[in-house]
Amino acid sequence: MAFPHRPDAPELPDFSMLKRLARDQLIYLLEQLPGKKDLFIEADLMSPLDRIANVSILKQHEVDKLYKVENKPALSSNEQLCFLVRPRIKNMRYIASLVNADKLAGRTRKYKVIFSPQKFYACEMVLEEEGIYGDVSCDEWAFSLLPLDVDLLSMELPEFFRDYFLEGDQRWINTVAQALHLLSTLYGPFPNCYGIGRCAKMAYELWRNLEEEEDGETKGRRPEIGHIFLLDRDVDFVTALCSQVVYEGLVDDTFRIKCGSVDFGPEVTSSDKSLKVLLNAEDKVFNEIRNEHFSNVFGFLSQKARNLQAQYDRRRGMDIKQMKNFVSQELKGLKQEHRLLSLHIGACESIMKKKTKQDFQELIKTEHALLEGFNIRESTSYIEEHIDRQVSPIESLRLMCLLSITENGLIPKDYRSLKTQYLQSYGPEHLLTFSNLRRAGLLTEQAPGDTLTAVESKVSKLVTDKAAGKITDAFSSLAKRSNFRAISKKLNLIPRVDGEYDLKVPRDMAYVFGGAYVPLSCRIIEQVLERRSWQGLDEVVRLLNCSDFAFTDMTKEDKASSESLRLILVVFLGGCTFSEISALRFLGREKVRCWRRSP
């Protein structure tokens, strides 16, 4: 979830309230088990928990020892055990094994299971099957939104994409609806709602039902957020498959940003220790470069280092009183800035080493060719070479998926060839990977009727056969094969620039991909914002094969201030990239300029 924002934009709502609510609810649940207790935490809940309630807060509420939920016997000697877990079957089996082991040993303890963000009936059924349902108490920690930054919220549900877009499991839609309901309860109703995609529509409808059931909670509230967009990830797979070139995106690709923080290893810290660093607007160095194209970052950091040195050098001409003021007021801040500057310079060097080794420029060139639809044969040959050299299994798959989506499926001969080469290079266990990618619509094979030869054949028949049905068939085949190309042309996703694109002074959102491509998801948001509806975008929606909705409540809009109507909430269902977040921040800055210029 991202808010396009800049310092001179309208004031953002205070999202720290979400963190306080989550913390208070967790403390309430822990205190329902009075006395000392050991807490077992699932691995992917550890980082969110640390952001909400750190170890010292847990200790204050009689949590004695912390354990990681893992597939081995627990060594806890405490008489009370609390489990903080995701609603997963394997977790229920793990808890059942501990409880049943205690029963066999004749030991009696109290057990509490806290599900986050919600409990599912299937989990309770497993506890019953294992014969321990009556031995444990179950509760929900309805933590669904974590503020990662002033303009960024996360549901921290890494399995959402796989569960919904691959398995077709709709269980998290209720969690999304509850999160939206919480936001509207705290920050007022949303005057303008837009969405695209099946998941978006279901989440919207469920959320509206919740709003109608509890209408009194938001009645009369002044909206703090003017627009909300719900977008399914499968509306725009292309953007997610492109290599990131903004600084924050490259940090994520290289070091993996988890829950708003990153672990920098010894190669970055220039010591023998790793360091966990929180990446947000409070890091002044990071905040100035996070949305920049990587080619601009080294120049900025060099200038920053020179400015910092100049501030240090001011000490030389100071008298005792001035030195005292400098030490007490400025020195600590300068040292902190110097430390952060060193870390980001180290991170840049590590990124450069890795990308140079992978021949990053050639990779970007191939991606741009695929996006524009040029040199497809050469691009396919590059992917084959990439696989044969075993550069990176993930990068190879990503390129194959990008080729598949931009060309509306691979030619059968190419599909078989690339698949065979990949399995030979990386192992037959990836047969399941190919099956999953096909099911998700990421890597598909063209049907015989969709090949270029078949389309050409159908079009050539139009010269002699004018039957309406056959004309439709011929052109529907052609349209099916070139959906991305048609959408790209319709929305001008590939900018036409005379000369070289100026990445230092970007003119549009395409800068996040070196001026080569405007993220489709962000372009849709921009277009709907300009129109204040989906009007005029019917053809785009049809090409995307998506059901759409646009909800505008004018009675609520009357209560909204002009400032709140400038605030935009974008909800990506299935995750988003840092490139898209940077593009939305750019869009926010441009909108602010337009608003300030308008009377």
Image (cartoon, rainbow, N blue to C red):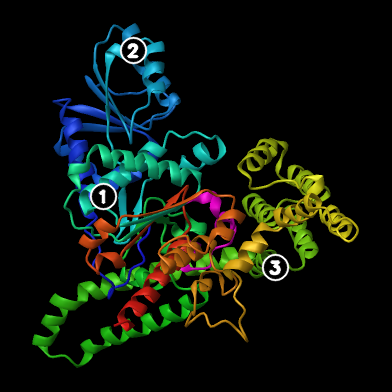
- Residue at which label 3 appears: 369
Q: Decide which of tag 1 and tag 2 comes sooner along the chain.
A: 2
In the image shown, does 373 or 276 lie closer to the viewer?
Answer: 373
Q: Which residue is identified by label 1?
A: 184
Q: Of the numbered discs in the image, which one, if any, rests on residue 132?
A: 2
Answer yes or no: do the residues labelled 3 and 2 have beta carbons within 8 Å?
no
Badge nearest the viewer, 3 or 2: 3
Vertical placement of residue 350 versus 1, above or below: below
**Real-space CA distance between mark 3 and mark 1, rounded to the nearest whole angstrom:** 43 Å
Q: Position of residue 455 (x, y in %)?
A: 82, 55
Q: Tell me whether the residue at label 1 lies in contact with that at label 2, contact meaning CB atoms closer than 8 angstroms.
A: no
The answer to if 241 sits in the magenta stretch is yes
Could one spot residue 104 in this view of the protein?
A: yes
Q: Earlier in the sequence, mark 3 or mark 1?
A: 1
Q: Residue furthest front?
A: 467
Q: Secondary structure at mark 1?
A: helix
Q: Nearer the viewer, mark 1 or mark 2?
A: 1
Residue at horizontal 42%, vertical 29%? Answer: 70
